Image: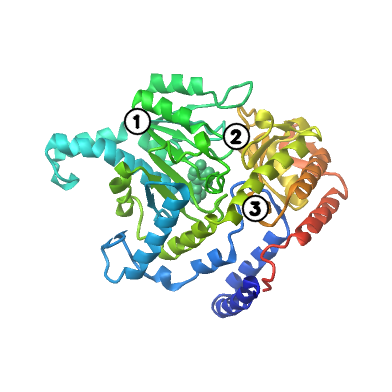
């Protein structure tokens, strides 16, 4: 069989030549990005490398069509092909995750969450209010009734994981619209074990009585017992929503099953498609049938016209995620995270929760005498791309932080295994143990400045290059 990457290689060469004639800076940046991605150890836990078929699917004339509405019920003429695209994407999502309903339109994870929040509000608040006011739609409400309903929308409560413990901004935090829409409280993790404490979550839920109980995280290195969370939601009559944006690939690949699979337990599940799921940038909402009609109102409720080219790429990625190869990939992502954690621990590092059982390792760099910002910058100097992240009760706040978040999805896509991840752990420790914080002119230790001992950046970049060259990204693709 011909290498499909080599065939796509000449297609991409042609495409970039055409782009170059219109705006050469964009062609140049596109080429440079491939070089950059190929030449660094990408440990950003939320990033991945989509396959070339997924990438190629994004760049077509499917983008040219407006298709507001839902499959078979569009507000524009001539949407038959978009209907095919959207229904194939939804079908793959339903089958892959065993979901009753799937909505493929959200443009991102944030959009998926907004769609879900408003679907829940429509189902739980608007529906009953319309009946109470004797109206069929919101357009039939009197001004007074509408004012009452608006207050009810804005007066709802959400309980989610605190940012500090690894939750996400969209789970009711003030800088995000969710924090302006909802009265939010959060649950954290146990101060000693740094693990979720379901008894504490239950106690908080009983006291606060939220409309929505949210589970899901961006920086928690452990699995969640969704059966327990569902039990808590049921006890207080809350809607149970799970945002699996980070770990959808582990659910898709059947690494998380039973109580660790959110889909059977949650009323509504949201996700991104571009993190561990390895698809195009985008979002999905999965729901119990009861919520389907409300979720379908995503456009025009909070979304514009669907991005048909992106829904097409989601369909291709979801088809890939249904293969045996993807299951192996997902298991490798989890196994590699174990190896990375063990490699860091045996070299004297401190990890939040003491380890991992998903795809994330949260390294507490205070034991190296560094802030997260210093550690992130020093690692970047040596070709290791990570992002700084708060640790629970972080003394350095959300900007400087005391942690660095590491993830295995991207390098596992390049074929890194146990030997490579152990070496990655060694390189990380080599950089951090050779980094010294620089005292600021005030005499206090600077939180951003650091020096890296002579030769370390070059040595580590050289070792990284060896690993990267042995596991090429998009082999056969030459620009
Ligand atoms: C990444 C993430 C999002 C947001 O996804 P975007 O596509 O960046 O909007 C939402 N929720 C969680 C838990 C995430 O990790």
Mark closest to the chain's N terminus, 2 or 3:
2
The residue at the point 61 percent across, 38 percent down is 399
Q: Which quadrant of the structure image shows residue 402?
A: top right
Q: Secondary structure at mark 2?
A: loop
Task: Name the mark on residue 410.
Answer: 3
Q: CA distance from mark 1 to mark 3?
A: 36 Å
Using the rendered image of the protein, determine whether residue 280 is visible from the camera's viewpoint.
Answer: no
Q: Quadrant of the N terminus?
A: bottom right
Coordinates of residue 209 in the picture (x, y in percent) = 36, 24
Using the rendered image of the protein, determine whether residue 284 is visible from the camera's viewpoint.
Answer: yes
Foreground: 123 or 7? 7
Q: Which quadrant of the structure image shows residue 21?
A: bottom right
Above or below residue 421? Residue 265 is: above
Colouring mode (rainbow / by chain / secondary structure / one colour): rainbow
Coordinates of residue 135 in the picture (x, y in percent) = 13, 42
Q: Which residue is mark 1?
A: 211
Q: Is residue 102 left or right of residue 137?
A: right
Q: Secondary structure at mark 3?
A: helix
Coordinates of residue 191 in the picture (x, y in percent) = 61, 21
Q: Tell me, yes or no, whether the two marked residues, 2 and 3, touch with CB atoms within 8 Å.
A: no
Task: Name the mark on residue 222.
Answer: 2
The residue at the point 55 percent across, 44 percent down is 247
- Mark 3 CB in 8 Å range of ligand 1? no
Coordinates of residue 291 in the picture (x, y in percent) = 31, 43
Number of dots carrying numbers: 3
Other residues around mark 1 within 10 Å, as few (<14) / some (14–19) / many (≥20):
many
Residue that extends furthest to the right in the rendered view of this protein: 454
Q: Tell me, yes or no, whether the two marked residues, 2 and 1, touch with CB atoms within 8 Å.
A: no
Task: Name the mark on residue 234.
Answer: none
Q: CA distance from mark 2 to mark 3?
A: 19 Å
Q: Quadrant of the C terminus?
A: bottom right
């Amino acid at each position: 069989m011909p290498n499909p990457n080599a065939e796509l290689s000449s297609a991409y060469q042609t495409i970039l030549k055409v782009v170059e004639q219109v705006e050469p800076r964009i062609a140049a940046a596109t080429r440079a990005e491939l070089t950059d991605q190929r030449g660094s150890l990408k440990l950003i836990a939320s990033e991945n490398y989509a396959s070339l078929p997924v990438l190629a699917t994004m760049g077509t004339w499917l983008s040219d069509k407006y298709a507001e509405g839902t499959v078979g019920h569009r507000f524009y003429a001539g949407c038959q092909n978009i209907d095919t695209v959207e229904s194939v994407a939804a079908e793959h999502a339903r089958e892959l995750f065993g979901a009753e309903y799937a909505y493929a339109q959200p443009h991102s994870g944030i959009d998926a969450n907004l769609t879900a929040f408003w679907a829940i509000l429509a189902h739980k608040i608007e529906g009953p209010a319309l009946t109470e006011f004797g109206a069929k739609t919101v357009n039939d409400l009197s001004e007074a009734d509408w004012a009452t309903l608006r207050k009810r929308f804005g007066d709802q409560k959400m309980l989610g994981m605190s940012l500090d413990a690894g939750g996400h901004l969209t789970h009711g935090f003030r800088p995000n619209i969710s924090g302006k829409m909802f009265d939010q409280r959060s649950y954290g993790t146990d101060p000693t074990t740094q693990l979720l404490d379901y008894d504490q979550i239950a106690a908080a839920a009983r006291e606060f009585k939220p409309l929505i109980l949210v589970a899901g995280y961006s920086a928690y290195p452990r699995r969640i017992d969704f059966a327990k969370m569902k039990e808590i939601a049921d006890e207080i009559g809350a809607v149970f929503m799970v945002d699996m944006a980070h770990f959808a690939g582990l659910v898709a690949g059947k690494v998380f099953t039973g109580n660790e699979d959110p889909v059977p337990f949650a009323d509504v599940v949201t996700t991104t498609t571009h993190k561990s799921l390895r698809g195009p940038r985008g979002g999905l909402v999965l729901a119990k049938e009861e919520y389907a009609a409300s979720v379908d109102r995503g456009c025009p409720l909070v979304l514009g016209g669907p991005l048909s080219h992106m829904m097409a790429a989601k369909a291709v990625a979801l088809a890939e995620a249904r293969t045996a190869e993807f299951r192996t990939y997902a298991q490798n992502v989890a196994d590699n995270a174990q190896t990375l954690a063990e490699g860091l621990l045996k070299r004297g590092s401190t990890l939040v929760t003491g380890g991992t059982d998903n795809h994330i390792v949260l390294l507490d760099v205070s034991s190296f005498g560094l802030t997260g910002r210093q550690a992130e910058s020093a690692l970047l100097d040596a070709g290791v791309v990570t992002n700084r992240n708060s640790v629970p009760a972080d003394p350095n706040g959300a900007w400087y932080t005391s942690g660095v978040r590491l993830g295995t999805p991207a390098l596992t896509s390049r074929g890194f295994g146990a030997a490579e991840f152990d070496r990655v752990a060694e390189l990380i420790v080599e950089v951090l143990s050779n980094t010294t914080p620089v005292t600021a002119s005030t005499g206090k230790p600077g939180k951003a400045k650091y020096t890296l001992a002579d030769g370390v950046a070059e040595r580590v970049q050289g070792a990284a290059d060896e690993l990267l060259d042995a596991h090429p990204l998009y082999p056969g693709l030459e620009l």
